[in-house]
Amino acid sequence: MPNTDLLPALLTKLNENQLALGAAIEELSNWVELRGSVEVADNIRAALWPQDNNLEFISMSLAVLNSPE
């Protein structure tokens, strides 16, 4: 893989990892909430808010980086 293709591929993989971690943490927050800790679950979801908020920008940026010139 040429070095010019490495950065977009790396960023794509890092984004996939971040989304997977976010999904796992969301599952844990659901589990915590079912056990009566609604406030803790809400705090977890609030901490995940930047990931959700930035997803569209990150996706669009990766699409531009991965598009042929």
Image (cartoon, rainbow, N blue to C red):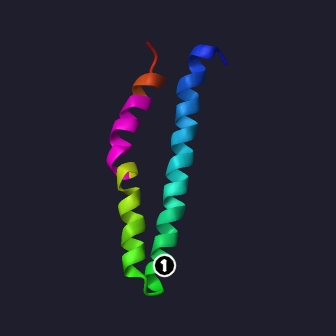
Of all residues, the one furthest to the bottom in this rendering is 36
Residue neighbourhood size for the residue with mark 1, other residues' Cα within 10 Å, grouped as few (<14), some (14–19), many (≥20)? some
Specify the quadrant that holds the C terminus: top left
Question: Quarter holding the N terminus?
Answer: top right
Q: Name the spot of residue 6 as percent of width and height, x first.
A: 60, 22
**How many numbered marks have been drawn onto this rendered protein structure?**
1
Q: Secondary structure at mark 1?
A: helix
Question: Which x, y percent locates residue 18?
Answer: 52, 48
Look at mark 1 in the image and give the residue it sits on: 32
Which quarter of the picture shows residue 62? top left
When the figure is inspected, residue 48 is found, relative to residue 6, above or below; the finding is below
Q: Which residues are magenta?
A: 52-62
Residue at (42% x, 66% y) in the render: 44
Q: How far across and down, in percent of the image, does residue 57 sit? A: 34, 37
Q: Is residue 28 above or below residue 63?
A: below
Above or below — where is 6 with respect to 58? above
In front of the other: 44 or 6? 44
13 lies left or right of 68: right
Q: Residue at x 48, y 78 (%)?
A: 32
> x%, y% of residue 67?
44, 21
Residue 54 shown left or right of residue 12 in the figure? left
Q: Residue furthest right?
A: 1
Instruction: Say if the magenta span includes residue 38.
Output: no
Given the image, on which type of amino acid does mark 1 rest? Answer: Val
